[in-house]
Amino acid sequence: MDKRIVARMTNLAVILFLILTCLFTLFYNTKDRYKVHELHEDDIVIEEVSDSEKKFDVDITETPKKNVTYSCPPEYKLDGVNCVSVIDPLKTCGDMEEYASRGVEGCIKPNTGVSSVKGSCLDGQAIKNDKCYEVYSYTYYCPDGYNLKSKKCSSIIDAIES
């Protein structure tokens, strides 16, 4: 009988140890995850580029062939042997509703408006049907074949040789 009690106590001790280890690990990871890390001037490394290294910092472009004429489709502009097109991105509100009025532009969520006080909303809020709505940014995207960068869509293709 004494062996069974010792075995049960040992099992309880192991289970308690595992539970405490899990809680400690969870607390330790959560604490570090949300910890603000401050940078000091000594932590920042600034690397200066020497004059000899600067001479290699050039764009490598293909040189146009002699006696060859290059052309591009109408929406592209010729740049060496490449055709480049830069256009404004398309925008969408997804499942939200587009809103543009009184200098406020963006997307609002339907049926989420809060009744306004005396017909005015906070700065940057949308007012529609005497309700105030939070305004969200558009989602920007590019047509197929274009890449989005800095709120512009760009496409580079090979020029047509003739």
Image (spheres, rainbow, N blue to C red):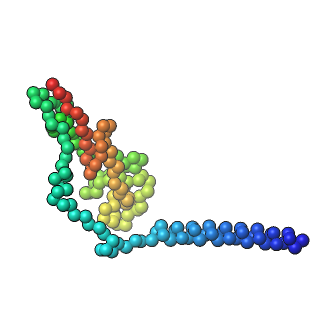
Query: Where residue 105 appears, x then y in whole percent?
Result: 29, 54
Question: Compared with residue 73, is residue 52 higher up or lower down, i.e. above or below?
Answer: below
Reply above or below: 54 against 158.
below
Q: Residue furthest right?
A: 1
Residue 50: which quarter of the image? bottom left
Query: Residue at the spot x=42%, y=52% of the render?
Result: 110
Please count the marks in the image: 0
Q: Residue furthest front?
A: 52
Q: Residue at x 33, y 45 (%)?
A: 141
Where residue 162 appears, x then y in whole percent?
15, 25
For residue 68, which quarter of the picture? top left
Quarter of the image for the N terminus: give it: bottom right
Q: Is residue 125 visible?
A: yes
The residue positioned 16% from the left and 53% from the top of the image is: 55
Residue drawn at (38%, 58%) of the image = 133
Question: Does residue 155 appear left or right of residue 116 in this picture?
Answer: left
Is 110 above or below relative to 13?
Answer: above
Taking depth in this image into account, of 64 and 30 the one nearest to the observer is 64
Q: Nearer the viewer, residue 134 or 74?
A: 74
Picture coordinates of residue 135 (x, y %)? 35, 57
As drawn, which residue projects farthest toward the top? 162
* Residue 91 seen in this snapshot: no
- In the displayed structure, would residue 69 be above or below residue 116? above
In which quadrant of the rendered view does residue 70 lie? top left
Question: In the image, residue 142 lies at what x, y percent?
Answer: 31, 42
Q: Is residue 44 left or right of residue 110?
A: left
